[in-house]
Structure formats: structure tokens, C-alpha cells
Amino acid sequence: MATDATLRPAAKRRGVFSGAVPKSFVRSPLAIASIVVVAGWLAVAAASPVIAPYGPLAQDIVGRLAPPGPAHWFGTDPLGRDILSRVLYGARLSIPVGVAAVGLAVVLGTLIGSTAGVAGGIVDEAIMRLTDLMLAFPTVILAMIISAALGAGIRNAIIAIMVAWWPTYARFARGLVLGARDREYVEAARAVGASPLRVFIRHVLLNILSPIVILSTLDVGRAILTFASLSFLGLGPPPQIPEWGSEIAAGRDYLDQWWIATFPGLAILTLVIALNVVGDSLRDALDPRLRKA
Amino acid sequence: MNLQAYVGRRVLVLPLMILGITLLTFVLSHAVPSDPVAANLGDQAAADPQAVAAFKHRWGLDRSLPEQYLVYLGNLVRGDMGVSITTHQPVLKDLSQHLPATIELATAAMLLSLVFGIPLGIVSAVRRDTVIDQIGRGGSLIGVSMPVFWLGLVALFVFYARLGWAPSAGQLSPRLTLPPFATGFVVIDALLAGQAGVAVDALSHLTLPALVLASSAVGIITRMMRGSMLEVLGEDYVRTARAKGLAPRRVTVRHAARNALLPVITVIGLSFGGLLSGAVVTETVFAWPGLGSYAFQSATSLDFPAIMGVGIVVATVYILVNLLVDIAYAIVDPRIRMG
């Protein structure tokens, strides 16, 4: 389990959390089930070329729009492609895109937000007002503006999500920096003559990273949903590439062939629910203040 | 600070925020590597030097960037947002035709999510860790994890194609004509015109998309209400009310729920942004003639003036809604004004 492995070093570094994290996290059966689901989807993404019964582009024109059956468990789409195979291949795209979009937004937001927190004064004010403005644009609208300007495509969809989301992380990081920069250990580092850059990176940035990482795991599910929305709207990858959102869009004109849209939708639903539960449990386990609620 | 001063200060900042939005959209429209002349005029007109020169002059593209922004702003103030490449109409006219349908859909969804979310949150908190709570929490988890466009398709399939309970997509049945324009909200316009049949038809068309759009906001509001309620239930005044021997129902509603509602009010404003995002995809599924459908059509045909117009209008609506919510919050909770 990747999540567990990445947690441990952080838990060791911050003595407060050591021990408590794995225990309370492992106690919830729902959290365990969700980790299994996420791990399952990761395995599917890795193994789809091996486990998919057909290629994602293989067409069977005679067998088009076939309902679920022994030959095609999830049925076929209007071009006669096997929906099960396309759903399995879809994981190869959605999961990395969700992680990449959130990762880029986190890096950009953390850099900008912690700069604001450290600099203070007019720089801080300017950056915070900019985030206010950015947050006034609903994600999908902002992403549509960016996609309209840059054109549709996977890369531009990732850029769109990154541009729409960095302000949230910037505000979060700024708040954490403001809380951390006057701590005694930071003052101590300054007092022994550490350079401002070293103080910032080693003593401030490293200490605010783990809450940011937790917040971002919560958002991978949302990023996958947003990416699917953009592809559903035709602002994602070109139609031949197997992607859950655009596969659902293909089912829009075939309401009676319910299987076309149903299975890609269930794929998104199961993955995003599992990611949300994992994120929630992580947050509850790591934030004792929230645990009582 | 008294209420007037608080409201006054917030309202004074409003023009600055809107100015900021125009600056941001301007920067976005100029930061992109595409050629605005070709993008706005289309290939045919871009080949005509006269049209290009006229376009450049109208939008001040022959001047420096700060000057260009002033020209852009001047045009905006006069209501000139350019001409849509796809509809060949002034963008402002397009927007004013599409905005009411979106506001109608988003408002209906917001009302539905409050009607379902608040009681569900209260019951989940009072009956904490019971089956009802588990169902409530599971439901809100599914609500925030579900792709809204997929839910829309499933709802259309089940309630329209299979059961025949819901009408087909669109705002009104094809055999009916829109009531005379008063507010732009079809249900209200029909009632104002005394056309009860049209109002009922419009309402039945509104129900399914509004329910679908409300699905994620219900989840957010239920979660928020539950959390807020749990916090309040632990307060001393609730214990006092119980100790006095008040009926449990009265304690829950009068003492706990009323106070627990306060933080939920702010979420209403914030989740309105999510509703507007959701409206874009919901509208395309239900052929709802609102801003979302317009934005979709403009974004896929690279209609830049149109999509910028949508951006400005939606961001402004979002800021206005949050201003109203904050003022409402300041009225019900005097502590906010002190800050």
C-alpha cells in the first residue's frame, strides 16, 4: 500500500503522530476496504494491457451496441468497442492525470502561498487578493476558459485544473507558514545564524508539508471528477483514447443502451468514493482535533 | 462596527473585486498564445486587412497593454463584450438570454439541497452512529463522489426513458411556447402571465435537473450541518436546556439547530460556486438553455469573447451571492461585525 508507506517516514519525523497513525487508521473497516479498492484500481491501471479481454481500439462493427453478455461483459459501444476493456484502460489515464493535476497545483500553490506568508506586507496582500479573485471563478468555468484558449487535450486539462486550484493550496500554505514562522525552533535556527533560505526550507517548509500532503490526497478524487467533467464536455483527450468522462458522453445519444454510460460512471464512482474515504480517514487519523467530531 | 458600516465597507469593495475580475480575464485573454484577431474574427474575416484593422482599432490592439486594458474596460462599461463567433450576436445579449435559466436551475438546486440537507444533518447528529446516521453519511459521501453528468444520464434513463415519470430534456414541452418575458424564470413568468399549465410544465421540467444538480450540494450541507450540530450539542446551554426538563425535540430544534445553522449559512455561498460549475455539465445533459450550455458551445468552438463574457458574469454572480450571504450572516450573528 503506497499510502501507508509514504505515511510512515512523516510519522517518525513528527513524534506526536508516531504509533497513533497506523492504529486509528487501520481500525476503520471502511478505510481498509477503501484502500483495497484504490489499490485494486492502481493494479488495474498497471495491468490493463494484460487483463483487458480486447484492445481499447479493437472494433467489432457487426457486434456494435451489444448488451452485456458472455463475449462482452460490459457490452459494446456505438463503434463496437469492448466497454470493459475501455473502462480498464481508462484507469491508466484518469489516475495519473488526477495525481498530476493535484501535484502541480500543490507545488505551485505551496510555493506562492509560503512566499506570501514569509514576505508579508504588500507582496502578501497582492497574492491574497489574487487568490480571492481566482476563487471567484468556478473550476469548470475557469478550466473551460483555459481549454478554449489553449485548445482541448490532456495536457491542457491538467493545466486548467492546476490554474483553477493553486489558490486554495496557496491560502492553506500561507496560513501554515504564518503559524510556523514564529515558532521557537525557527527562532532558534535564526539565532544560530542559519541563512533565511535555509530557515525557510528546512524549518518552515518541511514542517508544513505533511498537512498539505494530506489535504492534497483528499483532492485527488475531486481532480479525477473534474477531469472527467472536462472530457465529458469535449475538453479532454480525443475520442479514440479510452477515458471515462468521454465514454459517458458517448452514451448520451444512446439512452436505451444504458451500458455505454453506466460502467464508466461506476468506475469513476467507486474510485472517487474510495479516494474520499481514504483521504477523510487520513485526515481524521492525523488531526486529533478533528477526531472527536 | 455596526451593521451599516460593515455592509457599507463590503459594498464599497465590490466594484474593486469586479474590476479585479475584468483585469484577470484581460490578462488571461492576452496571456494565451493564440492570435486574438484570428480567434475573434474567424479565418475568413482575418484575411481581410480592413476588417483586421477595424477590429484592432476597436479593441485597441494597436496600442500598449495598459492602454489596451483601458479600452477593454471602456467597452465593457458600455456593455460591449464583443460579438460571439458562433451566434454572431453581441455577447452581452447572449448572456442576458441565458443567465436567467441558470439562476433558476441553481436556485432550485440550492433550495432542494437545503430542504434535504439540513434535516438530514440534524437527524444524523442527534442519532449519531445509528443506522440513520450511517445512511446519511453514506449518502452524502456518494453525493460528493458522483459525477453529476453521469447521474443526470442515469436519471434521464430511469425516470424518462423507462418509467416515463419525468418529461424529456429541455425547459418546456415542445408544444408550449415560452411565457412573456418578465423575470426570465420560466416558472415565475408563467405564473405572472396566469398560465398555470405552462408553469406546471416548466416546473416538471425543472425538477429532475435541479435534483441532479443538488446531489453534491446536499452532501456538503448534510456533512456541514451534522458537524456543526455535534459541536453545538456538546455546549453548556444545551445541557442546561435539557436539565431544565425541556422536551428533547424542543432542545434539538430551538436550542441546538438554530445555533448550528450559523456556520452552514457561509457554506451556502461557497457551494454556490460548485453549483455553477455543476450547472455547466447538468445543463448540457438536460439541454437546459442556460449559461452552462452557452459556455459549453463557446468553449468547444473556441468562441473566446463568449467564454470570457461567461467568466465575467459567473464570477460576478458568485461574488454577489457571497456578499449577500456574508451580510445575512452578519445580521444573524453580531460577532462577525466585530472582526
Image: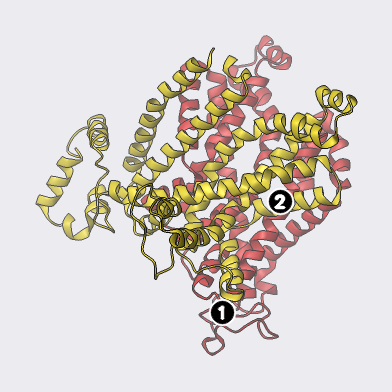
Chain colours: A red, B yellow
> Would you say the residues marked 2 and 1 are in contact, meaning their CB atoms lie under 8 Å apart?
no
Chain letter of the residue beneath label 2 in the structure image: B
Residue density around tag 2, few if under 14, some if 14–19, many if 20 or more, within 10 Å: many
Q: Whole-percent x and y of residue B208?
A: 56, 60
Left or right of A46? Residue A284 is: right
Q: Which residue type carries mark 1?
A: Arg
Compared with residue A38, is residue B320 higher up or lower down, i.e. above or below? above
Compared with residue A276, is residue A165 higher up or lower down, i.e. above or below? above
Chain letter of the residue beneath label 1 in the structure image: A
Q: Which mark is residue A81?
A: 1
Quadrant housing the N terminus of chain B: top right
Q: Viewer-nearest of labels 2 and 1?
A: 2
Left or right of B227? Residue B170 is: left
Q: Is residue A35 visible?
A: yes
- Give the CA distance from mark 2 to mark 1: 32 Å
Q: Which residue is mark 2?
A: B141
Q: Residue at x 67, y 25 (%)?
A: A202
Left or right of A60? Residue A210 is: right
Q: Residue at x 31, y 51 (%)?
A: B94
Q: Whole-percent x and y of residue B196?
A: 45, 59
Q: Whole-percent x and y of residue A235?
A: 45, 58
Q: Quadrant of residue B263?
A: top right
Q: Is residue A147 visible?
A: no
